[in-house]
């Protein structure tokens, strides 16, 4: 046997082995690049489409709030104020602006010009008058929400080169609006409606508030149910259950449940919660219960891993000091496992927040213009709202769909950031 | 006092009188099985109070399993069955009416690898007294912590950083902290399962010195791989091999003039 180094080590370096390694690295970088490009594309599309929805065009009109129309007898009675013909005041104002521009049939003209404002313009005016009764008899500049098509026009999303009959903005409207703009009567503000209103047939009046509250209630219920049950189940399975066939069977099933398509949980909710227990349809209560079922395995699995990762020696140290099994878990194992358990919980709930399919099955896909107050009120959820808006043909809903996606992404990123923060703050200390 | 199942005072006293010594524990025909595997095979011995008893023997000979029987830590392990009886101060600790959780508060244990809780030094020592309600006032607790740390020879080193995490201590300091934690609830027996195997020689020397001091007030059982250590610290030595107690007697006799051939083979380093 030779005791010197074999001459193989001096052979050519550019061997097949090194090429193989290099190739592998290139594949890896390529895969990463591909993923990054996809992600960036996704964000660019969503943000370029959606950001404009956070801006709303407003039309400012000088309105003469005449005493005769609003309150002829000067009683200032609320009922009189409520029933006054505010549309006439708006029409009069519009006519005044249009006076020099057109010489057309008045009725047709007013019909055209009314479309510039949202259908609730008269309500906006009414509320303003009721809140400020001293305005009556004066001329005031009032800011109205522009209708969705006008909003799109000012955002440059309407092609004016196509024939008049095929587009949403008539020539009359175009002329009128350009005139208003040159007078400085058009401005753009932050779209508060998007956050303070719920769903509506009119794009300019629709918001995500109802969906956000519906999602919040559903997540609250899902969390209240799945967190204690999940942690309890994990502790029991990991610390107390005897290792036998039944435990193995349960373990396998929990792992399988984590991979069950979410729509199946929706079917289960429909069959059991709605049809058997006759719980309210479309309610966040039921939505939350279905999401809790879906989240449970996603909490139990990481919680078990976290409990398992706590060194046995720490538990034994507590036992040897005369702590009971339960005390050793509550005082030592659980606090040490908590950060990892919390991470699991937050990621599980973040997934539940983005879940659509199970909610469709229990009827949370209705058009619900009211903002839900209680967990049994009909509601929808953010992802479902996105799904419904994406189905709407109006142009303005396209940008609102993307805006709702941005809002959903914001919540998801916020939740995941909390998870990452917790993980780093309570790094394992043993 | 009459004899019940749990308390077997008369036989205890008889033995004490007849031998005229300070007996702490009587172990009779103790066998331990993991599933079918016999880990400790029919061991009987008496442990004297306020003495150090060392268990030596090659790896896997059952000496750790044996001392874990004295505070019923084997109960935690599934499929582990214990046969025979252990009387400590006349109490049959395997009697069904004995609460093993309370038993463990009176028989302390120090483990092979230092296992301080990932908490502050203070909280490590204060955990036991708090758990058993020994000290409720802050002042009393402070005293117990200081006293325990002093007894464990650690107080001087850590008195300025009692609120720092125990994980920052060196291995030897951690082990002394574990000893302080054990004596904070004044056990009557301290079991030590290879307490120095993870420590360097200097830390080991400190622990041995500590054991020397502790045996004035506690009965100590120590498992060790290190025969010199057994010779240095113990009064009695038990030599285990393949689950059987081969020889048990005064440390001096075992190391100078063993009765059994196997013992001689082990202490002279021929196997194990």
Image (cartoon, coloured by chain):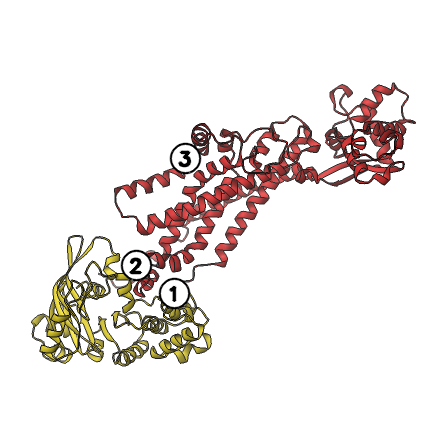
Q: In which quarter of the image is the N terminus of chain A?
A: bottom left
Residue on which the image places disc 2: A6
Q: Provide residue A429's location: percent of width, then percent of height.
A: 43, 62
**Same chain letter for marks 1 and 2:** no
**Which residue is painted at 33% across and 47% down in the image?**
A237
**Most foreground residue, A405 or A365:** A365
Residue at mark 3 to residue at mark 2: CA–CA distance? 57 Å
Front position among marks 1 and 2:
1
Front position among marks 3 and 2:
3
Please indicate, yes or no, whether residue B138 appears anywhere in the rendered image: yes
State left or right for residue A82 relative to residue A385.
right
Q: Provide residue A142's location: percent of width, then percent of height.
A: 82, 37
- Label 3 with label 1: CB-CB less than 8 Å: no
Q: Quadrant of the C terminus of chain A?
A: bottom left
Q: Within 10 Å of the Cα at label 2, are there few (<14), some (14-19), or many (20+) other Cα atoms?
A: few
**Most foreground residue, A240 or A372:** A372
| Chain-order first, disc 3 or disc 2 | 2
Q: Within 10 Å of the Cα at label 3, are there few (<14), some (14-19), or many (20+) other Cα atoms?
A: few
Identify the element where label 3 is drawn: loop
State left or right for residue A325 relative to residue B16.
right
Q: Colour of chain A?
A: red
Label 1 is found on which chain of the structure?
B
Q: Provide residue B192's location: percent of width, then percent of height.
A: 26, 70
State left or right for residue A364 relative to residue A152.
left
Picture layout, residue B257 above or below residue A416: below
Please indicate, yes or no, whether residue A20 appears anywhere in the rendered image: no
User: Quadrant of the rendered structure where residue B229 is?
Assistant: bottom left
Residue on which the image places disc 1: B117
Disc on res. A132: none
Picture layout, residue B171 above or below residue A96: below
Residue on which the image places disc 3: A260
Q: Colour of chain B?
A: yellow
């Amino acid at each position: 046997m030779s005791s010197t180094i074999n001459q193989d080590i001096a052979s050519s370096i550019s061997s097949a082995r090194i090429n193989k390694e290099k190739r592998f690295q290139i594949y890896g970088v390529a895969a990463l690049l591909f993923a990054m490009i996809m992600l960036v594309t996704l964000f660019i599309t969503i943000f370029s489409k959606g950001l404009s929805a956070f801006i709303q065009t407003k039309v400012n009109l000088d309105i003469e709030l005449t005493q005769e129309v609003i309150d002829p007898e000067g009683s200032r009675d609320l009922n009189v104020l409520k029933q006054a013909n505010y549309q006439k005041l708006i029409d009069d104002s519009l006519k005044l602006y249009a006076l020099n521009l057109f010489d057309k049939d008045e009725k047709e003209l007013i019909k055209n010009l009314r479309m510039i404002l949202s259908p609730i313009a008269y309500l906006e005016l009414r509320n303003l008058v009721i809140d400020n009764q001293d305005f009556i008899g004066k001329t005031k500049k009032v800011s109205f929400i522009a209708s969705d098509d006008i909003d799109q026009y000012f955002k440059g999303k309407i092609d004016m080169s196509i024939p008049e009959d095929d587009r949403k903005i008539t020539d009359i409207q175009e002329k009128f609006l350009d005139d208003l703009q040159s007078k400085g009567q058009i401005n753009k503000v932050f779209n508060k409606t998007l956050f303070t209103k719920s769903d509506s047939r009119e794009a300019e009046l629709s918001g995500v508030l109802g969906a956000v509250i519906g999602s919040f209630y559903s997540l609250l219920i899902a969390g209240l149910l799945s967190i204690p049950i999940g942690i309890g189940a994990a502790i029991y399975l990991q610390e107390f259950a005897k290792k036998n066939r039944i435990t193995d069977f349960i373990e396998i099933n929990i792992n399988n449940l984590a991979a069950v398509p979410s729509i199946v949980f929706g079917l289960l909710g429909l069959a059991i919660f709605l049809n058997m227990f006759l719980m309210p349809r479309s309610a966040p209560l039921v939505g939350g219960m279905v999401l809790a079922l879906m989240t449970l395995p996603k909490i139990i699995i990481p919680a078990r891993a976290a409990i398992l990762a706590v060194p046995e020696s720490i538990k034994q140290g507590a036992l040897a000091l005369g702590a009971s099994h339960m005390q050793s878990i509550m005082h030592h194992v659980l606090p040490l496992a908590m950060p990892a358990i919390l991470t699991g919980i937050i990621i599980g709930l973040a997934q539940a927040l983005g879940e659509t399919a199970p909610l469709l099955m229990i009827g949370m896909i209705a058009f619900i213009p009211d903002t839900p107050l209680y967990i049994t009120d009909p509601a929808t959820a953010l992802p479902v709202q996105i799904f419904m808006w994406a189905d709407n043909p109006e142009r303005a809903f396209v940008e609102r769909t993307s805006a709702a996606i941005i809002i959903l992404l914001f919540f998801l990123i916020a939740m995941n950031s909390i998870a990452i923060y917790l993980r780093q703050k309570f790094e394992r200390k043993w | 006092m009459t004899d019940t199942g749990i308390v077997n005072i008369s036989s205890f006293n008889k033995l004490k009188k007849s031998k005229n010594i300070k007996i702490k524990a009587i172990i009779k025909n103790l066998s331990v099985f993991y599933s079918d595997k016999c880990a400790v095979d029919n061991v009987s011995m008496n442990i004297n109070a306020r003495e150090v008893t060392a268990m030596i023997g090659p790896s896997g000979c059952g000496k750790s399993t044996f001392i874990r029987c004295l505070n019923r830590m084997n109960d935690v392990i599934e499929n582990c069955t214990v046969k025979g009886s252990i009387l400590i101060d006349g109490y049959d600790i395997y009697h069904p009416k004995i609460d093993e959780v309370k038993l463990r508060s009176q028989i302390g244990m120090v483990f092979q690898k230092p296992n301080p809780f990932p908490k502050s030094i203070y909280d490590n020592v204060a955990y036991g007294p708090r758990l058993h309600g020994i000290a409720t006032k802050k002042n009393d607790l402070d005293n117990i912590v200081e006293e325990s740390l002093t007894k464990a020879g650690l107080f001087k080193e850590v008195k300025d950083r009692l609120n720092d995490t125990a994980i920052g201590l060196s291995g030897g300091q951690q082990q002394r902290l574990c000893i302080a934690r054990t004596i904070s609830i004044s056990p009557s027996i301290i079991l030590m399962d290879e307490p120095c195997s993870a420590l360097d020689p200097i830390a080991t020397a400190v622990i041995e010195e500590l054991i020397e001091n502790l045996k004035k007030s506690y009965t100590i059982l120590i498992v060790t791989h290190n025969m010199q250590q057994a010779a240095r610290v113990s009064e009695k030595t038990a030599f285990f091999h393949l689950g059987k107690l081969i020889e048990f007697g005064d440390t001096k006799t075992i190391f100078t003039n063993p009765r059994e051939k196997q013992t001689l083979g082990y202490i002279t380093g021929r196997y194990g």
